């Protein structure tokens, strides 16, 4: 038994993320945990969700869930702009929190951010005020943030990290990407709800993995984590270019209001090593979740998706019926790269296993407050760099 405390989870939200989490809680083992129920803005939706998943209870609202004395871990499966307000409520109720990525950001005044009404320096400062309000509230309440960055737990990336560690060499360069042909979510295309576009919503994944790899290397070699030092970045709205707009048939989703659909950043760490992160919503062929580690003694490539664990061919779409192929692929015809368990490959069950064990044992999770805040620092530093066309020094913003 990893700890002696029971873990009782309350879900807030009844959409895509909540469904994903429930599927993966089913794999958590060796921990005395249960899911008490779900709350959302719509009690009827909560009731249907609870009925569908066989949950004990559909709470009448968030206040009712937070008042439940048995719930000691709240899983926030809600939109980015809602994270910090709900974290503050959880802290006031003395509940530990699981927060989906990205942790927080700058969301303006509730109106579309068209016309650059806010400068990126203001956004960076505002995002960090938001982050620190949440983290300080949790710390005062004596509870922890569990930052749901699944790439940190991906078995492929953990294996790559162990291989490099065993060589004894240094991690010199990390290259990572998450891309696909466009988010299904309308809210994710608007800065006021998502806090940015592709760079923060997709780039946060490979960035989080890269930061964690350098944390671990620093602790192993120097007794303290290696942290981000500076960033250079570029962003674009490629679905607004005249070439794309002239296409008569669109396979890439459009409709971006005021945020980027492509971004890339170049991060320098405080040991002078580097990471290159790319994120976009303009890549056909299914989701690309890949990370490479270039060490002084080895090179390791981790292909979460696509990979060659299961390769299938069909001459036309529809022949597989309703069988899942892989995330965001536009067609099921031709050669397909699928896997026996995409959730496992991406680290979702391992993430929730660690969170439940951490609450049971009253310890820090692997992916926690420092990673959540550093991802915010780097992404908003990147937005500032893209605006100003220069490298941005992150060290004054990194919390020690």
Image (cartoon, rainbow, N blue to C red):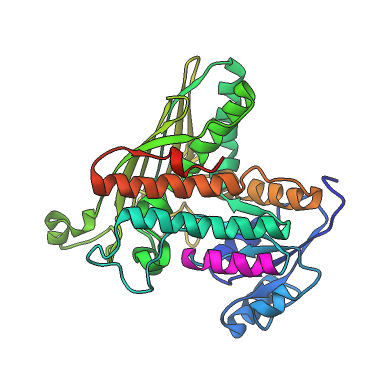
Position of 192 compared to 242: left or right? right
Residue 72 in magenta? no
Residue 82 in magenta? yes
Which residue corresponds to the image point at 71% horizontal and 69% vertical from the top-left? 93
Q: Quadrant of residue 78?
A: bottom right
Which residue corresponds to the image point at 63% horizontal and 60% vertical from the top-left? 137
The foreground one among 41 and 15 is: 41
Q: Which residues are magenta?
A: 80-92
Q: Main secondary structure of the magenta part?
A: helix
Image vertical order of residue 300 relative to residue 28, above or below: above
Q: Position of residue 285 (x, y in %)?
A: 34, 48
Image vertical order of residue 77 relative to residue 261, above or below: below
Q: Quadrant of residue 2?
A: top right
Viewer can see residue 283:
no
Q: Position of residue 316 (x, y in %)?
A: 35, 55
Picture mark count: 0
Q: Quadrant of residue 190?
A: bottom left
Specify the quadrant that holds the C terminus.
top right
Which residue corresponds to the image point at 37% horizontal and 46% vertical from the top-left? 381
Q: Position of residue 344 (x, y in %)?
A: 60, 46
Viewer can see residue 285:
yes
The foreground one among 30 and 343 is: 30
Q: Position of residue 225 (x, y in %)?
A: 58, 32
The foreground one among 319 and 147 is: 147
């Amino acid at each position: 038994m990893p700890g002696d405390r029971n873990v009782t989870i309350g879900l807030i939200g009844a959409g895509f993320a909540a469904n994903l989490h429930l599927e993966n809680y089913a794999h958590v083992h060796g921990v005395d945990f249960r899911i008490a129920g779900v709350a959302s803005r719509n009690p009827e939706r909560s009731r249907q969700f609870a009925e569908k998943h066989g949950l004990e209870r559909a709470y009448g609202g968030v206040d009712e869930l937070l008042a439940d004395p048995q719930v000691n871990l709240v899983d926030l499966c809600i939109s980015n702009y809602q994270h910090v307000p709900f974290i503050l409520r959880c802290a006031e109720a003395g509940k530990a929190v699981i927060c989906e990525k990205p942790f927080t950001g700058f969301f303006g005044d509730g109106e579309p951010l068209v016309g650059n009404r806010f400068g990126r320096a203001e956004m960076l400062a505002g995002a960090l005020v938001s982050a620190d309000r949440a983290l300080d509230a949790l710390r005062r309440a004596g509870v922890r943030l569990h930052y749901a960055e699944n790439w940190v737990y991906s078995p492929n990336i953990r294996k790559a990290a162990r291989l490099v560690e065993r060589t004894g060499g240094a991690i010199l360069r990390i290259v990572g990407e998450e891309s696909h042909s466009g988010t299904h979510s309308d809210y994710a295309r608007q800065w006021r709800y998502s806090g940015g576009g592709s760079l923060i919503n997709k780039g946060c994944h490979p960035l989080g993995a890269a930061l964690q790899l350098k944390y671990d290397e620093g602790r192993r070699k120097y007794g303290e984590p290696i942290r981000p030092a500076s960033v250079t970045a570029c962003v674009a709205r490629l679905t607004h270019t005249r070439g794309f707009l002239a296409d008569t048939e669109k396979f890439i989703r459009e409709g971006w209001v005021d945020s980027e659909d492509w971004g890339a950043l170049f991060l320098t760490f405080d040991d002078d090593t580097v990471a290159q992160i790319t994120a976009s919503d303009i890549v056909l062929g299914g989701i690309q979740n890949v990370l490479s580690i270039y060490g002084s003694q080895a090179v390791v490539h981790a292909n979460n998706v696509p990979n060659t664990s299961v390769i299938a061919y069909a001459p036309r779409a529809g022949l597989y019926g309703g069988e899942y192929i892989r995330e965001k692929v536009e067609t099921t015809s031709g050669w397909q790269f699928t896997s026996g368990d995409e959730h496992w490959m991406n680290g979702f069950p391992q993430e929730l296993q660690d969170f439940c064990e951490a609450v049971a044992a009253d310890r820090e999770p692997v992916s926690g407050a420092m990673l959540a805040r550093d991802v915010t620092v780097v992404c908003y530093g990147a937005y500032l760099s893209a605006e100003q066309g220069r490298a941005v020094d992150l060290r004054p913003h990194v919390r020690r």
